[in-house]
Amino acid sequence: MNTLITDLDVLTLDDAGTLHARTTLCLEGKVIRAIGEVPPGFVPDETIDGAGHLAVPGFYNAHCHSPMTFERGWAEDLPLDRWFNERIWVAESALTPDDVEWGAALAACEMIRSGCVGFNDHYFYMDRVAGVVERSGMKAALTWCQFGIGADKEVGTGLAGAVAFAEAWQGKADGRLRTVLGPHSPYVCPPAFLREVAALAREKRLPIHIHLAESPGQVANSRRDHGLTPTAHLEACGLFEGPAVAAHALYLTDEDVAILARRGVSVAHCPITYMKLAMGVGDLRPLLRAGVNVCLGTDGPGSNSDMDMKEVIRFAPLLQKFATNDAEALAGDLPLRMATRHGARALGFPEAGVLAPGRAADLVLLRTDGPHWFPRHDLVANLVHCGKGGDVAYVFVDGRMLLRKGELLTLDEERIRWEADRRARAMVAKNLSIVREYKG
Ligand SMILES: [Zn+2]
């Protein structure tokens, strides 16, 4: 499939931050063939009038739990520990594989609509999420979350099943799927289990996706129990010997930052969750100075409420500037790079995240004719701070169109909305009786 897009602006996010005005984009098969001149012999199957649109690399959501759309609005106005213990983990005990599938499908609709092309998902019944990835046309890195509390107590499957899932789906969906191992966190998983996961990751060559250092209490408990910070503890357990994504990493010592940099661990920063659950902020500047690959994520809709990466791109610099009293924090196009190139690299898609010939045709066209896009002193600033997820008009993944003029092409959104709503209500009804039991 070859696509020619004419007369559009293109923000490449290449090393120089090149912005092409009123240019032409040629997509050939899965890659970008050219920006500017149409190459001789290039015959498009479809031509799109790109006037009034800006092309940017598609967004990569570096940390989420997509099926938690079911818990949107179900655990409001609670601190992290009560949010987990009284609502989320109780709700998840009633979860079915069908719930996961429809919840992930709802998230996929929302992600595509707001310009997200790939997501790093950490949840249960992940074969169902893999099916959604296959059908939706998105890219994803998936892992079946493990608590390390005994195979019979895990949700859906134990570690052996999580490894079997990873081996079965690696590279599937026409190369759009990556699989990893996902121990929940150093505060839930026992050290022996973390070491077992690390050994399996080495043996099977699987990356790691884990939660890390979300609260001062977690750091204090880790020092008490292991004599190490959570970051140093994970390193000691061997979890950072291959590629890894650490979600959050908010409470870090200088040595923790050095460990993450030395080990090449990517950090997924989810600012809306931190604000909503009052978790604190974390200072990204030391991580960025140390060369850590910092990416952006929504986290699950139970805490972030939506899956809109464009909102995260705006909130990340706002929150850093606010929290650090440093107006230069996360300046210029850095939030966009964190949401594209950095995220793509963290998820195992290094060919994506930049618009250039030969790179993956993972891109988004935003309509830039709304009043919030004018005047155009600085198109990058307009994109970071003014552009809305709802401005996304076209989405391409590996050159395939998933959204055309705001219409989803791969997913039956009406059916998904109906099924997800119906099933989420049923889950909550089950949960209400569980909550009553739980509270005794
Ligand atoms: Zn999370």
Image (tube, helix red, strand yellow):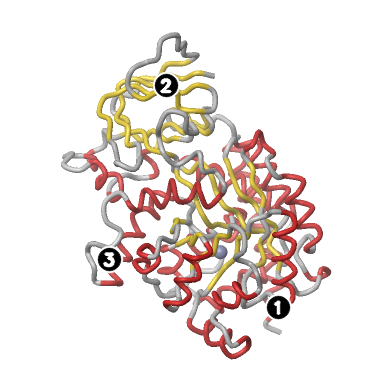
| Up/down of 29 relative to 105, above or below | above
Residue 98 position, x and y percent, is 73, 50
Residue 58 picture location, percent across and down: 45, 40
In this view, the residue in front, 263 or 325, is 263
Q: Tell me the kind of residue under disc 2.
A: Cys
Q: CA distance from mark 1 to mark 2?
A: 51 Å
Q: Residues within 10 Å of mark 2 (few under 14, many from 20)?
A: many
Work out whether 302 lies above or below 178: below
**Label whose residue precedes the other's in the sequence (1 or 2):** 2
Q: Check whether the beta carbons of the residues at disc 3 and disc 2 lie within 8 A of each other.
A: no
Describe residue 132's horizontal placement relative to residue 403 as left or right.
Answer: right
Establish if 243 lies above or below 257. Answer: above
Amino acid carrying label 1: it is: Pro
Residue at screen point 50% across, 51% down: 61
Disc 1 secondary structure class? loop
Q: Earlier in the sequence, mark 3 or mark 1?
A: 1
Quarter the C terminus occupies:
bottom right
Read off the residue under disc 1.
190
The residue lying furthest to the bottom in this view is 224
Look at label 3 and name its amino acid: Lys
User: Regarding mark 3 in the picture, which secondary structure is present there?
Assistant: helix
Q: Is residue 161 left or right of residue 1?
A: right
Q: Which label sits in the foreground, 3 or 1? A: 1
Q: CA distance from mark 3 to mark 1?
A: 37 Å
| Mark 3 or 2, nearer chain start | 2
At x 81% / y 60%, what residue is drawn? 160
Q: Residue furthest right?
A: 152
Q: Nearer the viewer, residue 232 or 277?
A: 232
- 298 or 88, nearer to the observer: 298
In front of the other: 27 or 291: 291
Residue located beneath label 3 in the image = 321
